[in-house]
Image (cartoon, helix red, strand yellow):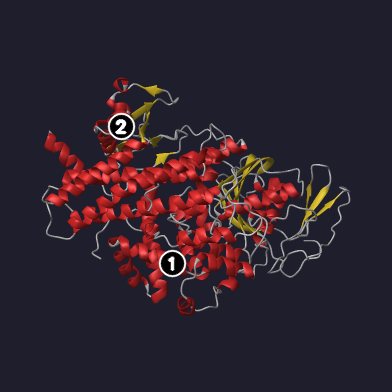
Amino acid sequence: MVEEAVSAFHSVAGFTPPPTGTTSTSAGRTKLAHRLSVDRKSIFKLVAELSQDNADHFCKCPTWTSYGGRIIECCTELMEMMPKLEESVTGLQEIAPRYDFDEKTPGNGYRSLICIADTVLLHLVSLLKLCIEQRTQIMFRITHYCKELEAYATVVRFLCESFSKTLIASSESPSTSLFPPLEGSYEKYHQILKDMEKLDASCFYGRPLGFQFSPSVGRVFRFIGIVLATYSLSWEKGHGAIGSLINSGRFFLSPEQRASRIIKVIKEADITFCKGFWNLSEMGNQMPKWFCPNMAINELRDLPSDGPLSLATTTGETVLIPEPSVHTGKRPVKIRVLSFQSRHGVSASGLGARQPLSPYILFHCHGGGYVATSSKSHETYLRVWAKLLNCTVVSIEYSLAPENPFPRATDECLFAYAWIVNNPALFGWTGEKLCMVGDSAGGNLIMSVNLRLIQLDVARKPDGIVPVYTPFLFQYLPSPSRLLSMMDPLLHMGIVLRCVAAYTGGYAACGGQAASSQSESESKGHKSLQEYVEQVQKTQRIDFQGGSQSIVSLVNLTGTDSHGFHIDKKRKEPKNIQVDLNQNGETSKTSEEENESEDDDNMSVSSVQVISDPLHIQLSTIFDSDLVDYLKNHPTTKSNILVCDENGEEIVEEAVEAEDICPEMEVVDGQEEEEYHTSPSSPIKEQVHLQRNTHN
């Protein structure tokens, strides 16, 4: 992840990596020589066949528990849903190409939904296959497989219903936009959203949690889910550390309880809870010091408050950037400065040998929904970036909502940018290349700053922008991204709306003020997301009723400047003209059941890749070799496997050696060990080795 971000800086902003003598490939790893894809229709057919096989078996061989009957019901439902899901996926495939960046860059929300459906199908194949292989064994875990099948069947049911509604919504959208028209009334879209809200999304937080991501990331999401559920119950009951530890065991052993608890958090948690949970990361502030590269410079600094800062425009004029003062008055803007090496300007004069100024600098804004975390809690990767890029990293410690709603954070980031550009030597920088990066809310902030720079016609703009996991449009409208947010293991739309309410100053309208007691919040019960949006809109300090409702577009790009900036045509004698601002920092209207724990080795089918081919599922470069072999040998799919080289050219199957399509190899204690990637319902590695030894 860190290396991918560093690579993005190199390509986007022209950063040149320092010579290190190391390679990005981990020792003991081998890349797949070829890419493998399989015909999607054959996978649908295979799921139906395997479901029929399992249903027939448990009909003929009933078990003494009720789980056999439940497996029959589940497999029967899967057979019935396959044609519906296939029809919906075909519909999404037909409209997806309209929204690609270009023919060579396939990728949009519709393609992401298709990938999720493909991943579910492959998980089901692996799960049903293993059920067939092990159902006659004495130690067959019928409870486990039954619950796994039911969980993924629920996901398929959700996809069938939601995809059909997404196709209806797409018919209302322009052919060039993933969203319906942003102007005018949204009433006709509300019913679609209300119908989507009625769907049971708890399946995405139980056993299949994080299934759409790679196995390693899925384990992280599962851990975060356990922490979230535990923290929520402890917050509600007032439990201490011991109670929290006991609760964490409950949510680890019972994915179903974890899912119901997370859904409760999504629906009912107020912004105070969200801030408290996200700020748990602040408790590990000392971790970077122990496990991350040591920094020559790691300081939290205050930028001097000496009045407005001037920036040159493209026409030779001057624009003045005032000190941030909205909502809570003037105070110094805080920044964190990190540098792996001592440099002239940024380091204290008393230090020893110092490196010359670097031609590069990284401008960073942290995430946290505008309401939580700090630059300190993001040091784990900032330190690595500072070392790998061999330049100064400046992270803005902007003020957080709801105490400091929009536009305070944007104003502070813009002021910090102007100060850095005007004083490059103080940051060990020559003033040449500058790259902006931000994750989540931080990515939104750097985009807002860049829109301001464009509006003000500032000559010195960033050389690169890297927004990571960044929200741009917050309208509560039907779209692929809104549906994806319902499956998101980290940031559900319900949480996003609470953060938006806090950031835009409408938090008090939602009954979520910090002064509100927890019991009062619970007594009100859950409002639908649409009702929540309507309440926010009624008292928004920013007009969300018509026109663009993007937080990014809250930066006014029309006519008179609305935040105290002034363009002076006399560059030599800049003059600060006061703009009439109201108390909120805006211009006046005149200017504008049984617990069954999850296997740690379950999550391994991995994800699929987005491709333009509407007929095939392309497997990612890390995949379950056992499943690949099964697909290559099964009568339904063996003739539908397509192997391509790295240039996309098809390779005849006979010419492909077995070693060319293989699992990754990892060196363990000097020996190569295969890293098997099996689905959340697949057997653990010991079972695979047991089968192989039996054959031997």
Q: Residue 310 vs residue 435: left or right?
A: right
Which residue appears at 23% of the width and 52% of the height? 145
Horizontal and vertical percent position of residue 461: 70, 44
Q: Residue 687 vs residue 412: left or right?
A: left
Which of the image's four quarters has the C terminus?
Answer: top left
Horizontal and vertical percent position of residue 2: 48, 44
Between disc 2 and disc 1, the foreground one is 1
Residue behind mark 2: 662
Q: Residue 681 vs residue 373: left or right?
A: left
Mark 2 residue element: loop
Q: Tell me the kind of residue under disc 2.
A: Cys
Q: Please report contact status of discs 2 and 1: CB closer than 8 Å, yes or no.
A: no
Q: Quadrant of residue 550?
A: bottom right
Rendered image: mark on residue 435: none
Which residue appears at 26% of the width and 58% of the height? 597
Which residue appears at 67% of the width and 59% of the height? 546
**Residue 371: in sight, yes or no?**
no
Residue behind mark 1: 265
Which residue appears at 25% of the width and 66% of the height? 593
